[in-house]
Image: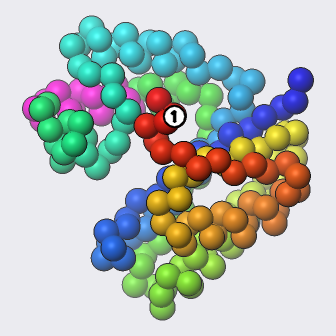
Amino acid sequence: MAKELSIFVDESGDRGGKARYCLLTLVFHDQADSIAEAVTGYEAKLARADLPSIPFHSEPLMNGHRDYEFLGIEQRKVMLAYFSSFVRKLPISYITLVYRRSQFEGPARLMERMGRDTSSAMVEHLDFFQSFDDVKVYYDNGQDIVKQALDRSVGKVLSKGVVRRRKTSMTDLR
């Protein structure tokens, strides 16, 4: 059976380039390590608290927008605490790269740095990545600079035959 690694990518700090910071997070999950029990426990906890089982989105949760607009602040705090507890139990690892936009002349420079930092992190743990037969990168293509940085770094560090890219949305992963 082929060993498969999933890399889920998300960014924060778009706001049309107006955000002071840009964060890029890569979550690594060895598909041999099931998350089913943790998901079932999380969903049961939400049900016992009479809270909706909806895809987690931090900005709308924190600000009471979209799927969370009908929930009060106390309910949203509980959801955040439950989700935090759930994530701590998952067999995952992650890295978050933080960039201050003012330190870059423009999006192209930021994209270059993201690509370089992603490559460096992967090279640092190359034995781990090379232990998998298949690596799937899931990204919603939200920001073009992130997509380009991933395309330039992940495929460069790992064998192109191993890496498969999947466009997705966070709600697809529910």
Q: Is residue 167 left or right of residue 135?
A: left
Image quadrant where residue 42 sits: top left
Image quadrant where residue 112 sits: bottom right
Question: From the image, which quarter does the N terminus lie in?
Answer: top right
* Image position of 104 with respect to 154: above or below: below
- Residue at point 47%, 12% (across, down): 40
Q: Is residue 79 magenta?
A: yes
Residue 71, image x and y in percent?
14, 31
Q: Residue furthest bottom?
A: 105
Which residue occupies the foreground of this view, 17 or 87?
Answer: 17
Magenta residues (range): 72-84
Residue 99, image x and y in percent?
47, 72
**Crowd band around label 1 with a 10 angstrom C-alpha radius: few (<14), some (14–19), many (20+):** few
One can see residue 98 in this view: no
* Image position of 127 with respect to 174: above or below: below
- Three-letter amino acid code at disc 1? Leu
Label 1 belongs to which residue? 173
Q: Is residue 144 left or right of residue 64?
A: right
Q: Is residue 172 left or right of residue 13?
A: right
* Image position of 103 with respect to 42: above or below: below
